[in-house]
């Protein structure tokens, strides 16, 4: 056959996918380092490490508006430029469906029904009196259930997706902040510190799947 055929990757150019994977992998590696550091009994050692992280984070510049390139510089090494915002936006409905179902099954239902068992799985120390822990655990589980349920609904309603993506991104950023604070204060089990990488990865993925529709 004449002509040249071109394979269109379902999630954009391979370069974009590779660089996003690199950023996600870096965030997970950072979470492991944070977890190991948080277990250190030396407060000075923890603060030295966090000072180093703060300096590196200041060099990480994000330009999301209008799909502008994201440039990440760590030290003297450039990781490259990625058009992050909405680069997989044509698949935003699939993303919301997966996020919605996952949130229901992983967070909403277990936390609402079995909050203490959930806490034990994440290596939290369970107090003798569990009434308050059960109450707040079930409240948070119900919130997660609503987030998941409306994620599934938003997947089939493009008109509300711009708002819902902003809502999700705010949730993920706040979860990163909460877990970073817990790591700094050394008041959470190491499993929660590892979650910093998980929530930060969700920030990046949500930006990548941002819907390509008018707000």
Image (cartoon, rainbow, N blue to C red):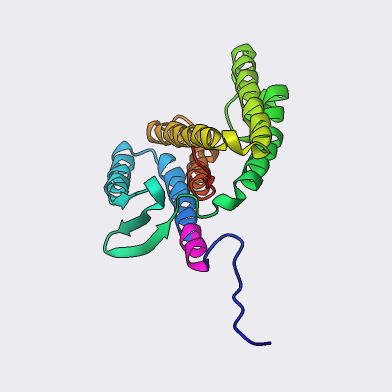
User: Relative to the observer, which residue lies in front, 201 or 188?
Assistant: 201
Q: Is residue 16 magenta?
A: yes
Residue 201 locus on image (x, y percent): 50, 47
Q: Dividing the picture into quarters, in which one does residue 102 lie?
A: top right
Residue shown at 73% from the left, 23% from the top: 113
**Where's residue 105, x and y in %?**
71, 35
In this orientation, does residue 166 appear?
yes
Pinpoint residue 130: horizontal percent, then vertical percent.
63, 15
For residue 103, what is the image quadrant? top right
Residue situated in front as seen by the camera: 213 or 154: 213
User: Image height check: is 52 above or below 126?
Assistant: below
Q: Is residue 137 magenta?
A: no
Q: Is residue 49 above or below residue 114?
A: below
Residue at 64 percent across and 87 percent down: it is 2
Q: Is residue 57 above or below residue 158?
A: below
Is residue 120 positioned above or below 86 on the image?
above
Q: Is residue 189 visible?
A: no
Q: Nearer the viewer, residue 45 or 171?
A: 171
Quadrant (top left/top right/bottom left/bottom right) for the N terminus: bottom right
Q: With 35 as the anchor, is 52 left or right in this view?
A: left
The answer to which of 175 and 163 lies nearer the viewer is 163
Report the residue at 51% width, 59% height from top: 21
51 relative position to 178: left or right: left
Residue 153, position as x, y percentages in the image: 68, 33
Range of magenta residues: 14-21
Q: Of helix, strand and loop, which mostly describes the magenta segment?
A: helix
């Amino acid at each position: 056959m004449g002509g040249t055929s071109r394979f269109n990757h379902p999630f954009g150019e391979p370069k974009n996918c590779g660089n996003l994977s690199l950023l996600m992998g870096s965030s997970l590696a950072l979470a492991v380092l944070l977890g190991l550091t948080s277990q250190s009994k030396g407060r000075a050692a923890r603060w030295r490490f966090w000072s180093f992280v703060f300096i590196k984070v200041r060099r990480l510049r994000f330009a999301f508006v209008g799909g502008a390139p994201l440039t990440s510089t760590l030290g003297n090494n450039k990781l490259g430029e990625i058009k992050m915002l909405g680069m997989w936006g044509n698949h935003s409905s699939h993303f919301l469906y997966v996020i919605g179902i996952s949130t229901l099954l992983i967070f909403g239902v277990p936390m609402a029904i079995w909050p203490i068992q959930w806490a034990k799985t994440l290596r939290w120390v369970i107090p003798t009196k569990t009434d308050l822990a059960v109450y707040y655990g079930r409240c948070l589980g119900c919130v997660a259930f609503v987030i998941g349920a409306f994620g599934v609904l938003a997947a089939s309603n493009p008109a509300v997706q711009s708002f819902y993506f902003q809502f999700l991104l705010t949730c993920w950023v706040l979860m990163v902040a909460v877990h970073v604070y817990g790591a700094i204060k050394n008041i959470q089990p190491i499993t929660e510190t590892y979650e910093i990488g998980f929530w930060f990865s969700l920030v990046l993925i949500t930006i990548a799947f941002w819907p390509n529709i008018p707000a």
